[in-house]
Image (cartoon, coloured by chain):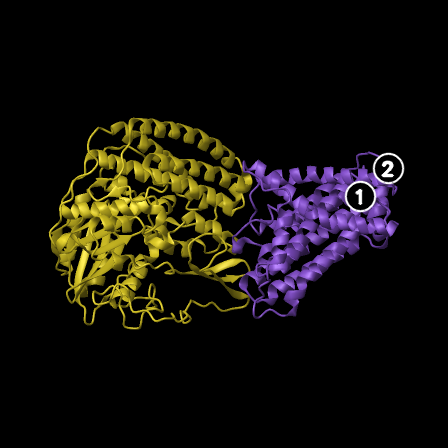
Amino acid sequence: MSAANWTANFLNQLTAAAISVEQFSLPSASLWQIESRHWQQFATLAVGQDVRWVAGWAEHVEGRLFINACFEKQGVYVLLRTIVNAAKPELPSQATVYPAASRSERHTQDMFGVHFTGHPDHRRWTRHQAWAKHDYPLRKDFPVQGEPETVTPPDKDYQFIKAHGEGVYEIPVGPVHAGIIEPGHFRFQAVGELILNLEERLGYVHKGIEKIAEGRTPESLARLAGRVSGDTTVGHCWAACRAMEQAAGIEIPPRAALLRGILAERERVANHLGDMGAICNDVAFIFAHMQFSRLRELWLRTNAAVFGHRLLMDRIVPGGVACDLSASACTLIKQEIVQLSKELSEIITAIDLNSSLEDRIYTAGYLAPEIAAAFGTVGYVGRASGQDRDVRRDAPYLPYDHASFKVALEDQGDVASRFWVRYKEINASLKLIKQFIAQLAAGSTLTEWQAPPAGSEALSIVEGWRGETIAYVRFDADNKIARYYPRDPSILNWPALEKLVLNNIVPDFPVCNKSLNGSYSGNDL
Amino acid sequence: MNWLIAMLQTTLFVALAPLLAGWLKCCKCRLQNRKAPSLFQPYRDLIKLTHKQPVVAGQASWLFTIAPYLVFSATVLAATVVPLIAVDLPTSASADVIVMVGFFAFARFFLALAGLDIGTAFGGMGSSREMTISSLAEPAMLMAIFTLTMTASTTNLSVAINHVLNDGLMLRPSFVFALLALILVAIAETGRIPVDNPSTHLELTMIHEAMILEYSGRHLALIEWASQLKLMLYGVLIANIFFPWGIAETFTAQALGYGLLAIIGKLAVLAIFLALAETLVAKMRLFRVQEYLSFAYLLGLLGMLSHIILEASR
């Protein structure tokens, strides 16, 4: 079945089910508008067609709420929308069909006061104690600075899932951890050392990204997008810029696209190097951790020398890029790739031969392919569980449409698979960087910005280092942002952690968590 | 005079323990291609901790506050039993190796209680893991030591070392088994990789560190010092029982000086081996520790059997 076919067939199916669809076209996706009462029925039909739930968010537009959900199959994205009245917003939940939609719907419930009927879990998610009961921060009438009390009351009444029985006990971990990581709370129910259940409680890094994005200029939004999650600064920045460019109908110069590709792949390599080391560190194989840290550090120093920023923040700007590569810098990068490949293969040999490490990472943290599919996991987490999905190949965008590379895939679904997928991805990224450098032709790196008409919107999907990264942007009049929603891959991957630690023992949790390495900041927004 | 030397020996034990920890750290850093901190860093850390005010949890009882002192004292008392630079000292004559194991058990008992006392999940988890491991480690350790003491027909360490010294260099299969068993037990008991990771920040993987997570200031300093002492104790035990040459048999200044140099050299070499092992292996899954310690017990048992079969009849 070709890619175009599934939407056509699915539309027929919707018509047969008496669901009326108004169709619009967006640059990277089709926009389908349905009535709110069909919201859940649509999901039921979609899940039957193996359509994946991708993202969900809402928007407050002049007394009405736009409820959006994004779906994908075979690299074709559909943006589903329904409009409800802001006075008493209510619609049937899709979370009953798609477990992945649960937290996004709870986020919408907290931020807009939308009631999703039939939602399996009506507890708050992002809502915290600084907001009064009927304050909905993302509605337009809520002030940007909020109306906080002098002292925020303690958060005491969140109802965690309880377990009862002989020898069952509860381990609360976090939000403050002993290491230098982001805050997040994990509640374990355990018998002895065996994990019966894990419940995540995130939201401690809520920064109000969506609210403070409103009214920004494109340049300012690009800077904000680069700070959704510090380690994915290129990914989010690219997604946001691409969405804005599509909304404004701007084409970026080919050289800028290639440079963006180089930046994104460099970010991927740096993060994968860090993660591979961190996985080893969590099973106390410190030698490998030190080696990977060293390689990552050298890589970041080249970033600083060539692009002017270690983590490549703010290198991507609306209309192109804010950096360029000289011929000598290209040579430097190519030499560095040769050096890195050589050193990496030495370390990998040492790791591959180490049976004590093998004993820890094989079979630990098993994520079954069915569960990975059910939760729509993306990036290396999905690919380690056989989910053959990569935006760079499935929905190619500049400069990947002219690149050849192999999508890394493993099917064991354990910590080791996620480790090896990262290694394969590093190699693929190094090849891609070389290809992009070879394709670089002289030219400008920036197109002049043109203010888009009010109400123009776009959805853009890029493959960040964690996986499919999405940005939705709608413009107001005067070149100002009306709504920005970034969907970090972590939003789909965090729920998978709750599943993959089951039947593992408590002391194996850190390495399972590290192998997934979700972003707290990207999740909490 | 003998008592004086015995006291001097114990003081040396207590004073040198952080140095051994510093040296071990230094070796590990070098093996990991890192710059090492100064050899004296553990001393600085201890001094820093004693200057800090201990923060004690609101629900902690008196047990939590006295546990560090008990743990430290018990470990120092255990150190008096083990000959460091000289044999035939009155302190080692008055107590044998079973007393030493008893002191360790005493210290562990109070540490585990203190871990439970503050009522956090980590403390309880650490105590539970520590007790699981020690219940397997102690029999293995006793089995290894009994093998040695059977050869010398005594449980007194000083006498046993003397016996080894007088017998001269000879290969005893039982000693090889016992040595291996004791090394495995020592790694488990001192919380080193692959059983426990003393430098981890991951609360959920901790064993020893989980019990002492709530300690701070001088309490933490005492506990840290006690664990450094324990590491050195095991090192000395292995070094002096199996390779006793160099230890002072007379109490002249020269012999004692040689004894000191010998033990420093032996410990330095042992630390290099430990650092190497810690660099080469990852930590094992918690449930593998049972197999590991059963293996140590088995080695101890084999040592004893080979002693009975091969050596006792002669």
Quadrant in which the N terminus of chain A appears: top left
Q: Is the residue marked by circle 2 packed among few (<14), some (14-19), or many (20+) residues within 10 Å?
A: few
Label 1 marks a residue whose chain is B
A429 to the left or right of A214: right
Q: Amino acid at mark 2?
A: Asp
Q: Which chain is purple?
A: B
**Residue at image mark 1:** B85
Disc 2 is attached to a residue of which chain? B
Which residue is located at x 36 percent, y 54 percent? A521
Return the residue nearer the eye: B314 or A445.
Answer: A445
Quick one: A493 or B14, which is closer to the camera?
Answer: B14
Chain A tint in image:
yellow
Residue A525 visible: yes
x 83%, y 41%: residue: B256
Amino acid type of the residue that numbered disc 1 sits on in the rendered structure: Ile
Residue A407 drawn above or below residue A135 = above
Q: In the figure, is residue B73 to the left or right of A205?
A: right
Residue indicated by mark 2 = B167
List x then y, in percent, for residue A525. 32, 57
- Assign a secondary structure to mark 1: loop
